[in-house]
Amino acid sequence: MFHAPHGYQRAPLPPAREQEPETPLQRTAATTTLRSGAAAVPSPAAPARAATPAPAAAPATKQRDAFFDNAKYLAIVFVAVAHMWEPVMDGSRATRALYLVVYSFHMPAFIIISGYFSRGFDLSRKKIQRLITGVAVPYVIFETAYTFFKRWADDPDQSISLLDPWYLTWFLIALFVWRLTTPVWQSLRHPLPVALAIAVLASATPNIGDDLNLQRVLQFLPYFVLGLLLKPEHFRMVRRREVRLLALPVVLCTLVFAYWVAPRIELGWFYHSSAAQQIGAPWWAGVVMTFALFGCSLVLTACFLAWVPGRTMWFTVLGAGTLGGYLLHGFLVKGAGYADLFETYPWLSTPLGEIFVTVVIAVAVTLLCTPFVRRMFRWAMEPEMNWAFRRDPLGNAARRRERRLAGKAS
């Protein structure tokens, strides 16, 4: 409230009684007006009671954060580009070095953000239903689709196995497991050291098997747990100007080191899909590489996030469709391989060809993240499936109370 100027005092008015709009439609209109931030100016012809203060605003719908949408879109572009580099980087030390750098942070960044947005997950009916429709059902659909695609293009004997994720679908089953265990990590006193210990044990245990791609589930687990522990201020910290400036020499030094180590290091370390013994290294190497890659991934992820724009950009809207970009770009990458494009056109493995395929896949994954594609594949990636779930009795009771109150008010 404004204070009256000196020399003029006015007796305080009695507190105005909040009035509930009379009908549900009026309640909606009042809430919309308040959310828009517009001041309610009474009409001169309106009755006196219209001048009473408007009811308190209802909690506004949580808006998407442009920073995280930008980060998700840029991360998924790096994922697609790295996948397209795989068939053309042989013989190119520079491309292999770039591949190592990108693989050091693109999935860790994506998983950390996934963990951050899983902090509110619990075992409530609503959250479980969302986990099923948003993760489990897309996994079943796309695991089946990729299997039939491989049958048609390359291997007629390829069998459908929901226990053995193929190609990109491992992330969905991993996210399903990670989210289900979220309450466990949130109840532990020191969850990150426990998750790192599990990752270390997995890296030294070759007989875990391929079911549900558990090696990746366990070895990438610390990044998800770290995301659960992060708070908004941590992301604000890495976006400070000094961090942004420091990120430049760090990335430059990483590129130089990657160029030196590129011919000497096994790529399997960066996939996190095998134990050390399966890569041809002693068991203790898995322990060392788990901690080394975790530290390297965190530094590069911080450098990546430091340069992600925080304001709304032309690609911000694409951040909501990154699941489509992730799941659909695999058909393009694998399709190009099955069609023998890289053998038919060897110039694609030249520096100019590598630039060309990089631009093509970046444009393609951008189109696959658009709202149009998201709407077109909503049935597979975000199905509602209300028919598959029981009605929530508490929710029904609340809706009945609302209808009774609305009837009395009218």
Image (tube, grey):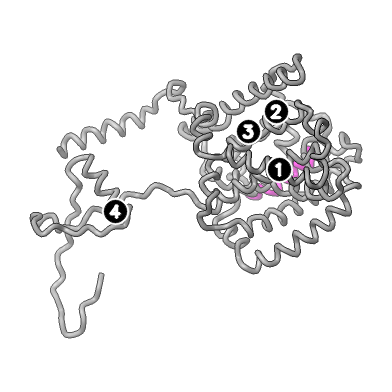
Q: Nearer the viewer, residue 272 or 153?
A: 153
Q: Which mark is residue 338?
A: none
Disc 4 marks a residue whose amino acid type is Leu
Residue drawn at (20%, 58%), measured in percent from left and top? 53
- Distance between mark 1 and mark 2 Cα atoms: 25 Å
Of the pair 146 and 122, the residue shown nearer to us: 146
Quickly name the residue at label 3: 327
Task: Indicate the quadrant where residue 47 lies.
Answer: bottom left
- Please count the marks in the image: 4
Residue marked by disc 2: 212
Which quarter of the figure has residue 206?
A: top right
User: Which mark lies nearer to you, 4 or 2?
Assistant: 4
Residue 320 spot, x, y in % from top left: 53, 42
| Magenta region, residue range | 189-203
Badge 2 amino acid: Leu
Q: Which marked residue is nearer to the observer: mark 3 or mark 1?
A: 1
Q: In 3D space, how far apart are the residues under numbered discs 3 and 2 (Cα atoms)?
A: 17 Å
Q: Quadrant of the N terminus?
A: bottom left
Report how far apart the C-alphas of labels 3 and 1 lie in the structure. Answer: 14 Å
Instruction: Evaluate whether residue 361 shows in this view.
Output: yes
Residue pointed to by mark 1: 81
Circle 4 residue: 34
